[in-house]
Image: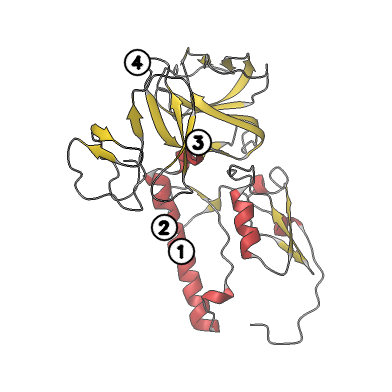
Amino acid sequence: MRLGNLAGQTRGISSNTSITITVSTNWTTNPDSTSQYEVKAYPDSTSAYTVKAYPDNTSVYTVEAYPENGSQYELVERDAYRALFFEGSEDHNVATGGTTTTLVDSRSNWTTNFWGVVIIVDGAGHGQCRWVYSNTSTTITIDGTWTAPDVNSRYVLVETPKENYFGDPASYAVRELCTNEWNTYQIARQTNIDAVRSTLNSSLGFTASDYIEIPTFFNRFSTPNEAVALMPNMVNSLVDTSRIIIAKPFGPRDPNGNDVFEEKVKAEITGLTEYFIDDWDTYHLGDGEVHCGTNATRDPPGTTWW
């Protein structure tokens, strides 16, 4: 089990039906709607499948093959291997091998010299992110060296990554940001935000309906009272009459190719037309966003707006 009330527990499977897995040893407690899982089995094909998984019928998972070790398969949530902070296409799968300068997937059929960055998310070499020097239909050659991937290495590829302050690739896979360390830091920052909301509520009489909640993700710092947005900060936007101009977040995409963060903002904001613009290089890398780089002349409201 990856997350939820059974996180960290592993059990052998004694049997399964189309919807139920029976484990060989009891869990410490029953799984619930917070329980996120991975299943390893030993079928015999290299086909990829899409299945519907608990807790509801919208949770799409994919089954992908490890070609070695008895054709071992692993059930993983596809959304966990979507990328952030890139443009163009993305891909993910499990390597069939590699060296200190390459990653090989013998099942792939990539366009030559198409990919920009490769990230190893699980298995040997996990946590490594490298520029792609070149690629053939089945082999990625990186710029530099790394710990060699093997048949347990799950990778993510992106076509055109965003870059950080130092010119290194800034792309992540969603799974990399789902660790306890990242989660703990985000919860602490939410505590800071909640304290500000509490002050506004008590001082100005605000209620929950006065707020529009916009998703963000903070970069981790060693000092507890310091925080900078890891992703383009959509709150730092510009309202212009009937329009709102927002930093494009370059978030993970849903199965239809839509940015999930953009879709969330569109659902939250009413009465304004949203325009998402790329300010990554111009302002985001300087710890600012759209509002920081614009000036607006405004007429004060004639009423007590607050």
Q: Residue at x 29, y 35 (%)?
A: 16
Q: Residue at x 62, y 61 (%)?
A: 267
Per the model, the C-alpha gap separating discs 1 and 2 is 7 Å
Mark 3 vs 2, N-terminal side: 3
- Regarding mark 4 in the picture, which secondary structure is present there? loop
Q: Amino acid at mark 1?
A: Asn
Q: Is residue 27 left or right of residue 40?
A: left
In percent of width and height, residue 256 lies at 63, 43
Contact, mark 4 vs mark 1 (Cβ under 8 Å): no
Q: Residue at x 61, y 21 (%)?
A: 132
Quadrant occupied by the N terminus: top left
According to the image, label 3 marks what residue?
81
In percent of width and height, residue 269 lies at 65, 65
According to the image, label 1 marks what residue?
192
Mark 1 vs 3, N-terminal side: 3
Q: Amino acid at mark 3?
A: Tyr
Q: Is residue 61 left or right of residue 278?
A: left
The foreground one among 9 and 189 is: 9
Contact, mark 2 vs mark 4 (Cβ under 8 Å): no
- Regarding mark 3 in the picture, which secondary structure is present there? helix
Per the model, the C-alpha gap separating discs 2 and 4 is 42 Å
Quarter where residue 27 is shown = top left
Per the model, the C-alpha gap separating discs 1 and 3 is 29 Å
Per the model, the C-alpha gap separating discs 4 and 1 is 48 Å
The answer to whether residue 95 shows anywhere in this view is yes
In percent of width and height, residue 215 lies at 56, 57
Quadrant occupied by the C terminus: bottom right
Per the model, the C-alpha gap separating discs 4 and 3 is 23 Å
Q: Residue at x 41, y 49 (%)?
A: 183
